[in-house]
Image: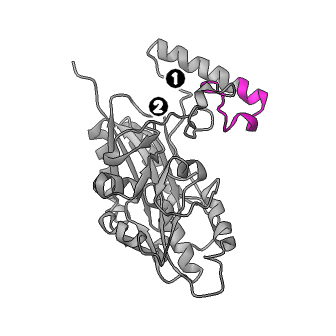
Amino acid sequence: MSKPVYLTAAFYKFVELPDFAERKAPLLAFCESRRVKGMILLAEEGINSTIAGMPDDVHAVLAYLRADPLLADLQHKESFSEKAPFYRMKVRLKKEIVTMQVPGISPTKMAGTYVKPQDWNALISDPDVVVVDTRNDYEVEIGTFAGAIDPRIKSFAELPAWVAQDPVLAGSGKKPKVAMFCTGGIRCEKSTAYMREKGFDEVYHLEGGILKYLETVPPEESLWQGECFVFDERVSVGHGLKPGNHGLCRACRHPLEAGATESPLFEAGVSCPRCHAHTSDTQKASARERQRQWELAKQRQQVHIGATLPKPESP
C-alpha cells in the first residue's frame, strides 16, 4: 500500500479586506472540515498562508478562497511530501500580513515593476542598478544573488531604517534604479511600495521571488549563489527546488551554520551556537522537555501536538 502524499500550498495576496476579522471563523471551520493544517494570516491588507493536507482537500480550500471575487486570481506554489508537515490549523488576525511597521504602505496601489525570472539576470547585471536582498541576515547567509547588497537586518521591519542610512539610497543626488528580491515575492512587493513612497521612480522586484527563479532558470544560466532558505521542513532548496543540505535549529528556527552540530553549544531542539546565549535556563529546560516529548511521540509513531506551526514568509 502506497504512502499518502501531502500537498503543501503557499500563497499570499495584497488586497483590501476591510472585513478580514469576520472571515476568520468560517475560513477556519472550512479548513478543519477538510482536515487541512497550517497557518493563515489575515489582515486588512490581505492574506498570507502555508497550508497542507490531502491534495483534494487543499485544492478545496483554495477553491473556497477563490470563490470570493477579491481573491479570484489568488496564486499559489505547491510542494509534496510523504509526511504531514503541520499538525494544527490556525487562522490569525494581524495588523499586517508581512510586518514593516510603516503606516500607509500599499502594494496594491504602488508596488514596483514586476520582472519575470527570465529577465532578472539582465536587470541585475546592469551596473546602474542597485540590487537589494530584502531578507533577514540568516537567510542571506546561505545564499543570494551575485552582487546583491545584504542589509544585515534581523527582521523585515528593520529594512526602512537601513534604507534611511544607506549612503547610496539615502543620498541627496539622483535616486538610482533599485531591484529588490525575497523568497516568494511578498516582502519585495511591500519593500518596493515603500521605496516608491520615498520617491524612487524606478523600482523593480523579482516576480515569484527566488523560488520561481530557481524553478525556471537553468543552473547554467543562473546568477544565484548557494541555497535558498524556506519556511518549511525542507529548510533550504537549490536549483529546480531540490532540497538543500542545511539543517534547522528547532529552537530558533534558523538554519544551522557549518559545524554547528559539533559545537558544545548545540543541543537538538534546545539551542545552537546562534541562539544559545539568547535564551534563559528556564527556556532551555522547557525546550528540552518539548524535545523529549517529541522524541517519545516519534518512537511511538504518534503526532506531537506541540509541533511548531509553519511561518509564512517573513517574520
> Mark 2 touching mark 1, by CB under 8 A?
yes
Residue 296 place in picture, x, y as percent: 54, 14
The kind of secondary structure element at disc 2 is loop
**Magenta span of residues:** 266-285
Q: Nearer the viewer, residue 61 or 284?
A: 284
Q: Is residue 120 above or below residue 225?
A: below
Residue at (54%, 61%) from the top-left corner?
A: 134
Give the label on residue 272, or none. none
The kind of secondary structure element at disc 1 is loop
Q: Is residue 219 above or below residue 54?
A: below
Tell whether position 154 is magenta. no
* Residue where numbered disc 1 is placed: 304
Residue 52 place in picture, x, y as percent: 38, 39
Q: Nearer the viewer, residue 85 or 43?
A: 85
* Residue where numbered disc 2 is placed: 87
Q: Nearer the viewer, residue 268 or 76?
A: 268
Residue 40 visible in the current orientation: yes
Residue 106 visible in the current orientation: no
